[in-house]
Image: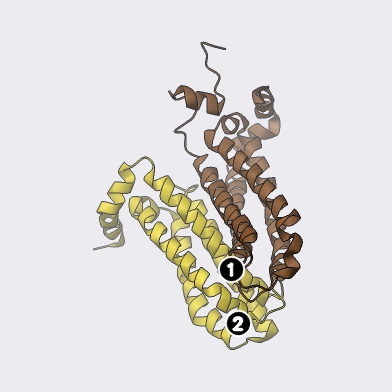
Chain colours: A yellow, B brown
């Protein structure tokens, strides 16, 4: 089974078909995906801005992370819960869409970077320079994911 | 009075046509508008969640405002700039979009809520600045803010869909709401 066959099977799932056959399901799920984007942005930015010495400067970065983390996880859950059905409804289109692949590579990078590198280091106090670097990389990766996601609709 | 003639004139200007027909400019402006949600809606949500007493409970409200609202303002500037350009690229259809009209009403309501919060709700902030759970008025204002901005995001996204466009058969109500010009009456 090659990748295209996998994507074809995904597109033919019941979830994908139901969304494709509905007039309003795709827009509705997409709208919730955008609300999740806002929450993701907020819970991400407070931490990354703080690492760059901006935003909530009065508090240690690990405290800001502790406050923001549950909301970041909730936002990620929302993004997956809405993003996967959206993908299932047009898996073949995504397969031929370079923005989709940029987004998937960015997303994988973002998740690994955030949970394996950024969060553990922030908890151990990375210092100013490394902290700023973590904040910059995080902003760069996640903004790429968001922009590539939007671009899927333009590069179809 | 209808703004339709003005929108028709806008649509006939050189830069509007150029933007509308552009291969890259329009998608880039549109993407900037959407990606700025991370900054604008994100910081709004963080401040509102603090006011609801469910996040950043040991950060004073004044500190959230002072440290984060400048970023919200920066986001708003990008939103308004790109939003106006998006309208300028497609003036007539957008003006006659039911979704756009509801979005504008919500934007006005959100602006009034911001004004009301800063002028009235926060007047006695010193007394509850460090409270983990702010008083009811502040929580209501934050809840209203979250509902309105969520609506603005959802309606904004719906502008892209043509379900209620004037060129399609619509009910009298939609014709009226969208300000469609019915040929027989015109």
Query: Is residue A155 shown left or right of residue B82?
Result: left
Tag 1, which secondary structure? Answer: loop
Residue A22, image x, y percentages: 33, 42
Res. B172 mark: none
Estimate how packed mark 2 is, as few (under 14), some (14 to 19) or many (20 or more) residues with alpha carbons within 10 Å.
many
Image height check: is B86 above or below B70?
Answer: above
Q: Residue furthest left?
A: A1
Q: How far apart, in angstroms, are the residues tagged by discs 1 and 2?
A: 20 Å
Residue A17, image x, y percentages: 28, 48
Query: CB of mark 1 within 8 Å of CB of mark 2?
Result: no
Residue A34 visible at all: yes
Could you tell me which residue is drawn at 68 percent across and 22 percent down? B1
Q: What residue would you read off at disc 1?
A: B53
Image height check: is A150 above or below B97?
Answer: below
Image height check: is B186 above or below A108?
Answer: above
Residue in front for this viewpoint, B92 or B103: B103
Q: What residue would you read off at disc 2?
A: A62
Residue in front for this viewpoint, A126 or A73: A73
Image quadrant where one finds the C terminus of chain B: top right
Q: Nearer the viewer, mark 1 or mark 2?
A: 1
Residue A40, image x, y percentages: 53, 64
Residue at mark 1 shares a chain with residue at mark 2: no
Tag 2, which secondary structure? Answer: helix
Estimate how packed mark 1 is, as few (under 14), some (14 to 19) or many (20 or more) residues with alpha carbons within 10 Å.
many
Image height check: is A14 above or below B10?
Answer: below
Residue B36 visible at all: no
Residue in front for this viewpoint, B163 or A111: B163
Could you tell me which residue is drawn at 51 percent across and 52 percent down? A151
Residue B15, image x, y percentages: 69, 34
What chain does badge 1 belong to? B
Query: Is residue B135 shown left or right of residue A83?
Result: right
Could you tell me which residue is drawn at 41 percent across and 58 percent down? A83
């Amino acid at each position: 089974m090659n990748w295209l066959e996998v994507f074809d099977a995904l597109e033919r799932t019941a979830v994908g078909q139901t969304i494709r056959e509905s007039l309003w399901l795709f827009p509705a799920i997409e709208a919730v995906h955008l609300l999740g984007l806002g929450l993701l942005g907020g819970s991400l930015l407070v931490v990354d801005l703080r690492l760059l010495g901006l935003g909530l400067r009065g508090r240690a970065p690990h405290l800001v992370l502790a406050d923001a983390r549950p909301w970041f996880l909730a936002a990620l859950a929302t993004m997956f819960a809405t993003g996967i059905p959206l993908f299932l409804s047009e898996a073949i289109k995504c397969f031929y869409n370079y923005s989709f692949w940029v987004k998937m590579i960015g997303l994988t990078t973002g998740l690994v970077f955030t949970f394996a590198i950024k969060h553990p280091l922030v908890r151990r106090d990375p210092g100013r320079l490394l902290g700023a670097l973590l904040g910059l990389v995080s902003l760069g990766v996640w903004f790429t994911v968001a922009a590539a996601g939007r671009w899927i609709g333009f590069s179809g | 009075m209808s703004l339709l003639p003005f929108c028709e004139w806008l649509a006939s200007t050189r830069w509007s046509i150029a933007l509308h027909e552009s291969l890259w400019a329009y998608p880039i402006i549109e993407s900037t508008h959407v990606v700025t949600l991370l900054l604008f809606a994100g910081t709004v949500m963080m401040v509102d969640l603090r006011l609801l007493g469910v996040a950043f409970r040991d950060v004073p409200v004044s500190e959230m405002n002072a440290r984060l609202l400048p970023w919200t303002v920066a986001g708003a500037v990008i939103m308004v700039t790109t939003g106006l350009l998006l309208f300028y690229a497609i003036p007539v259809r957008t003006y006659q979009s039911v979704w756009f009209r509801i979005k504008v009403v919500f934007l006005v309501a959100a602006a009034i809520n911001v004004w009301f919060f800063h002028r009235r709700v926060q007047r006695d902030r010193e007394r509850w600045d460090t409270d983990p759970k702010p008083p009811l008025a502040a929580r209501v204002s934050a809840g209203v803010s979250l509902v309105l901005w969520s609506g603005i995001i959802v309606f904004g996204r719906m502008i892209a869909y043509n379900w209620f466009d004037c060129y399609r058969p619509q009910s009298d109500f939609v014709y009226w709401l969208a300000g469609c010009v019915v040929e027989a009456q015109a």
